[in-house]
Image: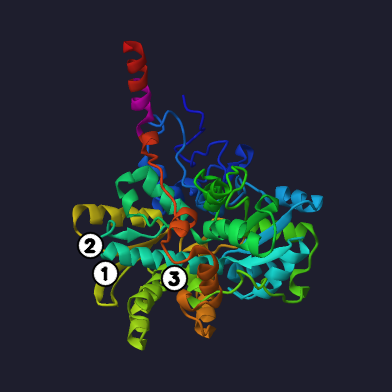
């Protein structure tokens, strides 16, 4: 007897799921959640509840909540907790905003499709009571510095190829659960949000003479899986540095949908706000950092920086070559050159599509040097934590992110003056001992859940024989 009612129609969800929750009374048994979890995410049809001892497998992507027509599946909210902390006035509240938030938030307030509302977004966050507003695009630039260096290292034989990106926590959990043999292929880099958190609790805290124990870092994200990522025990490296396990990289993740609810609850007239700017420290980014929110953006940005690290310049031909990874198709391939090395790279979104790619790599049908994977359609611009999410918005959001890149004089992380200063004053250089401790992580083999019933029987037999 399963605890998950009519699970042949709907996706099963555990009550303690940190990203989403279900109101069974609202469910109309339409099957849309099960359909998307099976067809696009490749999860619901890939495991057996009998074998998992009736425990639901979830990669926390939130796509089921996105397609639920009646709100039976919702994002687990954390904004009210953050609001209460702000009201107490006893913590320094630092908020950072992910790349795609600025091109998706305005859709909920009647703005044009994909309109850049960065200035109003920052003003709204200050109106909500945050002391500092920082840009996760800066964290994306840190990620690229580390990831491009790691790619070069792997291309030189120090690590497995292909190297898979690790910015998407839903994708990472998918690998950990269904393809643990590919864990060594995952980049060890933390996501931009996690790198922001560690750097805020160390470098930023020191520069502003704030005790890290007094900082609450809140990240605004388009992604429900970031709530799971923030809860991972590995995401406390600043705490390890200070020998204080209460210090987390990121204390709370508030999705765009939650931010919209919060702004409306405070009766803030979003469209009437005067535009504001990010704080000066950890608020500057390159064009490469800006495009992280779109499928292909992580790949293109990493290739740019790897090219700069290899030969200290990017020619127009290089730039045109790297732009080949752009597009709207769910699976794309390109041949590029980094330094004196010719690479075959891939970009895919939707973990069901990634599943197909992994099988092709395992069989030897395809070879890649690097693959970018995003769980959600179109990348983070189609995240499960967004307030407005029709597919018709994806192209507009993507084009706005690339327009930000086009207008930037600084195209690569290595030219970002704040990044240069960060490494000079704190991390030293990419892949240094300190950056390895603070900015890189380990992964967990979660595949045991898929055969838990057999595992539990083995344990019982072992105990009996003992």
Residue 202 pos. (x, y %): 59, 57
Q: CA distance from mark 2 to mark 1?
A: 7 Å
Q: Which residues are magenta?
A: 451-457
Give the secondary structure at mark 3.
helix
Residue 38 pos. (x, y %): 41, 48
Pointer 2 residue: 367
Q: Residue furthest bottom?
A: 316
As drawn, is 28 to the left or to the right of 89? left
Q: CA distance from mark 1 to mark 3?
A: 16 Å
Q: Residue at position x 68%, y 59% from top? A: 94
Q: Quadrant of the C terminus?
A: top left
Q: CA distance from mark 3 to mark 2?
A: 21 Å
As for residue 342 lying within the magenta part, the answer is: no
Q: Residue at position x 70%, y 72% from top? A: 120
Secondary structure that dominates the magenta span = helix
Dots 2 and 1: beta carbons under 8 Å? yes
As drawn, is 416 to the left or to the right of 122? left
Rendered view: 115 above or below 246: below
Pointer 3 residue: 297
As drawn, is 192 to the left or to the right of 457? right
Give the secondary structure at mark 1.
strand
Confirm whether residue 57 shows in the render. Answer: yes
Residue 245 pos. (x, y %): 59, 42
Pick the front one: 96 or 104: 96
Dots 1 and 3: beta carbons under 8 Å? no
Confirm whether residue 295 shows in the render. Answer: no
Give the secondary structure at mark 2.
loop
Mark with earlier residue (3, 2):
3
Pointer 1 residue: 344
Q: Residue at position x 47%, y 66% from top? A: 428
Residue 247 pos. (x, y %): 61, 47
């Amino acid at each position: 007897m399963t605890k998950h009612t009519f699970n042949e129609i709907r996706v099963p969800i555990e009550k303690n799921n940190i990203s989403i929750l279900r109101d069974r009374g609202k469910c109309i048994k339409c099957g849309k959640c099960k359909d998307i979890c099976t067809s696009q995410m490749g999860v619901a049809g890939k495991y057996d509840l009998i074998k998992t001892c009736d425990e639901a497998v979830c990669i926390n992507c939130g796509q089921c909540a996105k397609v639920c027509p009646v709100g039976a599946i919702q994002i687990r909210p954390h904004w009210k907790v953050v609001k209460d902390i702000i009201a107490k006035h006893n913590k320094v509240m630092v908020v950072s905003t992910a790349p795609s938030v600025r091109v998706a938030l305005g859709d909920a307030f009647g703005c044009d499709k994909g309109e850049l509302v960065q200035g109003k977004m920052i003003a709204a966050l200050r109106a909500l009571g945050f002391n500092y507003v920082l840009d996760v695009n800066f964290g994306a630039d840190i990620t690229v510095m580390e990831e491009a260096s790691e790619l070069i290292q792997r291309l030189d034989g120090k690590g497995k190829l292909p190297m898979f990106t690790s910015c998407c926590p839903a994708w990472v959990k998918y690998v950990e659960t269904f393809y643990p043999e590919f864990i060594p292929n995952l980049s060890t880099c933390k996501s931009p949000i996690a790198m922001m958190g560690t750097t805020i609790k160390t470098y930023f805290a020191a520069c502003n003479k704030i005790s890290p124990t007094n900082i609450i870092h809140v990240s605004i994200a388009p992604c429900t899986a970031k709530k799971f990522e923030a809860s991972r025990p590995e995401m406390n490296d600043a705490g390890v540095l200070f020998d204080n396990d209460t210090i987390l990289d990121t204390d709370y993740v508030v999705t765009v949908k939650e931010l919209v609810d919060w702004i409306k609850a405070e009766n803030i007239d979003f469209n009437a706000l005067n535009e504001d700017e990010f704080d000066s420290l950890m608020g500057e980014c390159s064009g490469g950092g800006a495009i992280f929110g779109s499928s292909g953006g992580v790949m293109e940005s990493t290739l740019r920086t790897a090219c700069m690290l290899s030969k200290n310049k990017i020619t127009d031909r290089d730039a045109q070559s790297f732009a080949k990874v752009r597009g709207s198709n769910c699976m794309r391939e390109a041949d590029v050159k980094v330094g004196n090395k010719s690479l075959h790279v891939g970009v895919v979104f939707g973990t069901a599509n990634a599943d197909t790619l992994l099988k092709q790599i395992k069989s030897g049908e395809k070879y890649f040097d690097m693959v970018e994977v995003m769980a959600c359609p179109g990348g983070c611009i189609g995240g499960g934590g967004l307030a407005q999410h029709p597919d018709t918005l994806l192209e507009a959001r993507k084009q706005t992110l690339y327009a930000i890149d086009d207008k930037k004089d600084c195209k690569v992380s290595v030219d970002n003056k704040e990044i240069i200063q960060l490494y000079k004053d704190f991390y030293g250089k990419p892949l240094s001992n300190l950056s390895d401790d603070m900015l890189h992580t380990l992964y967990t083999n979660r595949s045991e859940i898929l055969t838990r019933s057999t595992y539990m029987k083995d344990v019982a037999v072992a105990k009996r024989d003992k």
